[in-house]
Image (cartoon, coloured by chain):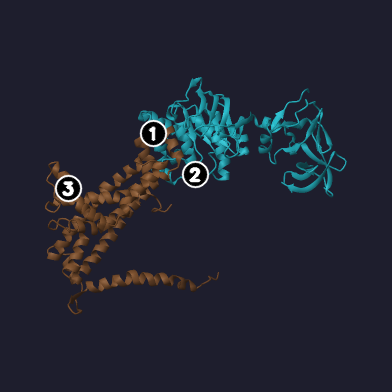
Amino acid sequence: MDKQTNQRGWLLVLPVVVIVAFSAILPLMTVVNYSVQDTFGNNQFFWNGVGWFSELLDPRSELGARFLEALWRNLLFSAIVLAIEIPLGVLVALAMPRQGWTVAFCLVVMALPLLIPWNVVGTIWQIFARSDIGLLGAAVNALGFDYNYTRDSFAAWATVVVMDVWHWTSLVALLAYAGLKAIPEPFYQAARIDGASRWAVFRTIQLPKMQRVLIIAVLLRFMDSFMIYTEPFVVTGGGPGNSTTFLSIDLVKLALGQFDLGKAAAMSIVYNLIILALCWVFWTVMTKDSGARGVR
Amino acid sequence: MARIDLVDLAHTYLAQATSAADYAVKPMTRAWRHGGAYALLGPSGCGKTTLLNIISGLIVPSRGRVQFDGRDVTALPTERRNIAQVFQFPVIYDTLSVYENLAFPLRNRGTDRRTIDARVREIAQLLDLSGALDHRARGLTADVKQKVSLGRGLVRSDVAAILFDEPLTVIDPHLKLQLRAMLKQLHRQLDLTMIYVTHDQTEALTFADEVVVMYEGEVVQAGTPEELFERPAHTFVGWFIGSPGMNLLPCRIDGTAAVVGGHRIGLGRRYAALPADRRIELGVRPEYTILAGLNGGLPVRVRRVDDLGRVRIAKVELAGHPVAAIVPDGLAIDGEEVAIALDSNRLHVYADGHLVAPAEA
């Protein structure tokens, strides 16, 4: 059989190729370019091979130790945030009304935090949690707790985590709610006939049916929390000390603070690869038993 | 032990019903004998699913009572009624195996492990699911899923009635036949009341001992398939059952004859005079409307002849009204002008849709 070939198809793909090249591939290649060279003022470049990479990945070097610390800090932050936001979001979704005017009300209220820009969220909490004039900070202190996020690293962590939970649990809740709404009524009716308890309904119907949206929620929340920058930067500036210096904050310090473009470029690339690898792991593990790799 | 009585039952989805049209199920009193195989037949939106959900307890009726063996269960939640229901789309618990799916209703009721195991294996055997017990329910085909959801009803030894809500809608045609045969066999084997909701007359007529036809929230007739065919109590039944449906001709009754557009049709029975403000119709099935040669009876004009293979159906016009008639084997239709002969024992008179009994035989 003669297979018809039509080369015009390539022409149609061309705009996408151009856009992706300009928005992603060229900038990425620039970063690769920096990562293998050392730069000096007035644009002098010297070939450095994989020097920056080997320094970065060597925990005994200063750069490597610093990177590893920020990495652990960031992983811990993501883990805490996921562990709180996912169950909390599901609980909120379960508690949301299914019909009536309260649905619209709840949805709008839930969407509000998501509509606020990152730096505004940071500023709100920066003031809200201040121990001298902030409503929350002052109230906590008045209750007898010594709370000051600029001095105490535990308080700083607590502030950043609570802020993230406040900002992003809505997203998980909305996704979970969409998943819940998609469950046809007969499932609940059958469960009633089968005499299922509330918990059994959750375990055998709601959770499995929400699985797909929860995978998306976990991925989104992981990626977002793993590249978090603005809010902690505005609230704590990475402090006190380096206690809330997450990867992206460290990266900016390295690139724009110290102007070590080569080191920073190498760090960006490794950072990027870590995110890709972790997302792949999440995806593989979470879709393992849904048969056709999430396609159904 | 489950005779189901609906006593003066009605349901509306509105907060306040003001007219008869507001009722999804209009007031009715009806008994379902223990061990019967019933079909609830009617077009979409006629209230059959609502009625089913009232019996199973998923809906609390706006008024009236539901009784199981004389015990009032109207207020009882569905899990406390000895009833199971199979839905239009297979409801299975995705993440559980077939075995666990079948065991689920028993586990929820705290049955001991050994009884559960014995019961699940027995039912799996019955439904031909023994080989699939260890499978994840998610990957099963629609027909097996539907068997599993039926099985969840059957495992409970307390279940005395199973309600089916158009259970074969998503099943492939050739499997439909098998499943229907299986249901029929189960009904004979087990001492269960079965109520089967469908809008497919073939399904209803082959499954049930008694077919209950619903129309606009009302039961218009309940009877054996033969009764529904021979003596439709309502023009809707005549039209809905049979293919093509019953011929209905607007007419005037004059003693022992019906007058259709100037033609007198002998009824063989005398009817009392019917008030002029009611819509009077003469009903006769196409099976008893035979096309004949020119000099055979009522003169009609042929519009079209459909060859259905087994039989030929002529669409003709009698005094401007469309009529379907059987074309006897070997009759050649020559031209448009022919005649039809009606079997006078099979003529029915309807007033405002309802069958009118003759005044004398």
Q: Name the residue at the top extreme.
A: B70
Vertical side of A288 occupied by B90: above or below: above
Label 2 resides on the chain identified as B
Q: Nearer the viewer, residue B135 or B206?
A: B206
Q: Which residue is mark 2?
A: B142
Q: Which residue is mark 1?
A: A196
Please identify, in this view, whether the residue under mark 2 or under mark 1 is nearer the observer. 1
The residue type indicated by label 3 comes to Gly
**Label 2 SS:** helix
What residue type is disc 2 on?
A: Ala
Decide if residue A76 is in sight here: no
Q: Quadrant of residue B277?
A: top right
| Label 1 to label 3: alpha-carbon separation | 45 Å
Mark 3 crowdedness (10 Å alpha carbons): few <14, some 14-19, many ≥20: many
Residue B190 shows up from this direction: yes
> Horizontally, is B218 left or right of B87 in the view?
right
Quadrant for residue B174, please give it.
Answer: top right
Q: Residues within 10 Å of mark 1 (few under 14, many from 20)?
A: many
Kind of residue at badge 1: Ala
Asked where in the image residue A101 lies, by quadrant, the reply is: top left
* Chain rendered cyan: B
N-terminal label among 1 and 3: 3
| Residue B172, x across and y down, in percent | 55, 45
Residue drawn at x 33%, y 48% is: A110
- Residue drawn 34% across and 69% down? A23
In the image, residue A20 sits, relative to residue A188, either above or below, namely: below
- The chain letter of the brown chain reads A
Disc number lying in front (2 or 3): 3
Q: CA distance from mark 2 to mark 1?
A: 23 Å
